[in-house]
Amino acid sequence: MKLMIRSQPAILAWETKNAQQTTPSMPKEPLNLEIEEPQMEMETTKSVIHIDQDQCFNESGLKNNSAFLEDMVARSKQAVMEGIAHRVEEGNQMMAIETGQDAIAEQASYNAWERFYHEFGLVTMPMSRPIITVEEGDVSYNFKRGSVRVLNGPFQIDRGTYEPGKVEYYMKQKNSITITPVGDEVDITL
């Protein structure tokens, strides 16, 4: 059996009305205005950032004169105290004859080799952070308002008119599908 299919699409229609506006009429004579300008006086103090990197430079070996002097004084005091302690220890070894040790040979060996054995370390990066302090700034101001006075002119203002537009829409034609059989033969082929 054969089928005939007919379809009809939906159709929308609309009607529009444009918006209308009338511009205000300008005054016929120019306006005379007395204008006093607004004024603002501002006084600012800038913010200041202080960055103290002395400790960072000291740790990296880039010391200023006072830090270098303090370091040398401390090292000198330590060297003097170590020297005194070393001499006292050598004297005590020499006095201890009863122990039977050869104090002179031991001291000679120590003073020739062991005393000068050191481990060295090299530091190029500072371990401390810089000290950052901020002095905040300030802004003070004095504001004097301005004014506008109309000396002549129209005191009733024509603002004009406005009429909004419109859009109306409607269904002009509805959609539909019609199926009708044609003929009386049945086709059963696959």
Image: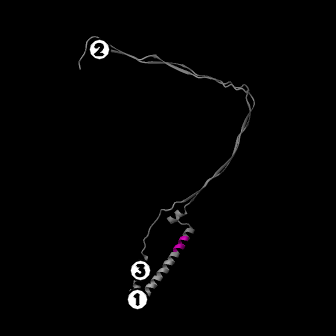
Give the amino acid type for the residue marked by disc 3 in the picture.
Answer: Tyr
Q: Residue at x 64, y 51 (%)?
A: 138
- Callout 1: SS: helix
Give the amino acid type for the residue marked by disc 2 in the picture.
Answer: Lys
Pinpoint residue 47: horizontal percent, then vertical percent.
Answer: 61, 53
- Callout 2: SS: strand
* Magenta region includes residue 38: no
- Callout 3: SS: helix
Quote the CA–CA distance across marks 1 and 2.
136 Å
- In this orientation, which residue lies closer to the viewer: 17 or 179? 179
Pinpoint residue 145: horizontal percent, then vertical percent.
Answer: 71, 40
The stretch in magenta equals: 70-75
- Please report contact status of discs 1 and 2: CB closer than 8 Å, yes or no: no
Q: Is residue 104 above or below residue 51?
A: below
What residue would you read off at disc 1? 98
Crowd rating for badge 2 (residues with CA inside 10 Å; few <14, some 14–19, many 20+): few
Q: Residue at x 50, y 76 (%)?
A: 79
Q: Residue at x 53, y 64 (%)?
A: 55
Quote the CA–CA distance across marks 3 and 1.
21 Å
- Please report contact status of discs 3 and 1: CB closer than 8 Å, yes or no: no
Q: Reading the chain from its start, which is encountered first: label 3 or label 2?
A: 2
Give the amino acid type for the residue marked by disc 1 in the picture.
Answer: Glu
Pair 3/1: label in front: 1
Q: Residue furthest bottom?
A: 98
Q: Is residue 28 left or right of residue 182?
A: right
Pinpoint residue 80: horizontal percent, then vertical percent.
Answer: 51, 78
Q: Main secondary structure of the magenta part?
A: helix
Residue 2 is labelled as 2
Residue 110 is labelled as 3
